[in-house]
Amino acid sequence: MNRLFTTFKKLKKKSNKALIPFITAGHPHPLMTVPTMHSLVKNGASIIELGMPFSDPMADGEVIQLSSELAIKKGMTLSSVLDIVAEFREDNQETPVILMGYLNPIEKFGYKKFVQTAAKSGVDGLLIVDSPPEESEDLLSLLNNYNMSQIFLIAPTTTMDRQKYIVSKSGGFIYCVALKGVTGASNVVYDDLSTKMESIKSLTDLPLAIGFGVKDVNSAQAVAAYGDAVVIGSALVQKIGKCEDQKQIENTIEAFIKPIAKAINK
């Protein structure tokens, strides 16, 4: 039993939804990431999605691309991302941490070494955007050995047959992409989200987390009605990126994340 299972089980008993904020490790500065993670938990985060900075984040919009670029310029590496998780675990053993990113740095690091180090650091799962289930058998096998989950995406354009295949390989939760396109989309219209989520629910008992386009209380409430968790990324990353010190980050998180956490559980 891992932290993801335990967290969703506790939330379900209370009929509550999970809030999953995304931040990029090392942005706006490597020394700020761990305190930011703690601040997110303090203000209602149930799970943290921590971005692994990469030079070519093709599934992300301009905001997260820039945060990744800036974090790399500050010296962030895959090893330092894992060090951040380990430091976070010194004071928090309960909140699940998911690493989100791309396969190239993990291949360079070495699958086995990466999974072993991630497990030791306290990582609970991976969301690797460019690693579909068909190409993830080696990684999945290693993750299963260390009681870690690989989380896969289901997009609005994913066919029913492919949905069945994806959920058969998934662990932790299913990341349901609410919109076509990249992260940070503007002009958000959630087209027939209810029908899409019901379709996925018919295939799996795993929790459904909905992301892409969530940027405020209203949009968070709109998607929370159809899933078990709400993911918010670009809007938060953009706000954090404008902060000059840790105090500003903490004030920003309290003002932005706390109302969202409260709103999705009304």
Image (cartoon, grey):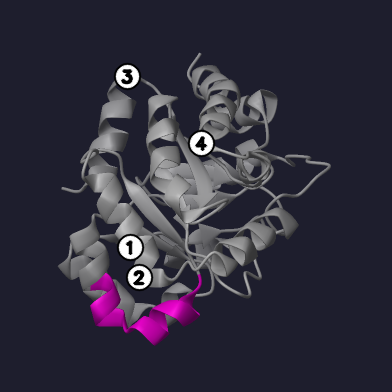
**Name of the residue lying farthest toward the right:** 187
- How far, Cα to Cα, is label 1 from label 4? 21 Å
Residue type highlighted by circle 2: Ser
- How far, Cα to Cα, is label 1 from label 3? 32 Å
- How far, Cα to Cα, is label 1 from label 2? 5 Å
Give the vertical position of 34 relative to 128 (above or below).
Answer: above
- Dot label at residue 82: 1
Neighbor class of circle 3 (other Cα within 10 Å; few <14, some 14-19, many 20+) is few
Instruction: Report the residue marked by disc 3.
Output: 14
Give the residue drawn at x 44%, y 33%.
40
Boundaries of the magenta span: 102-115
Nearest to the observer: residue 175 or residue 20: 20
Circles 1 and 2: CB atoms closer than 8 Å: yes
- How far, Cα to Cα, is label 4 from label 2? 23 Å
Give the residue drawn at x 37%, y 35%.
38
Residue type highlighted by circle 1: Leu
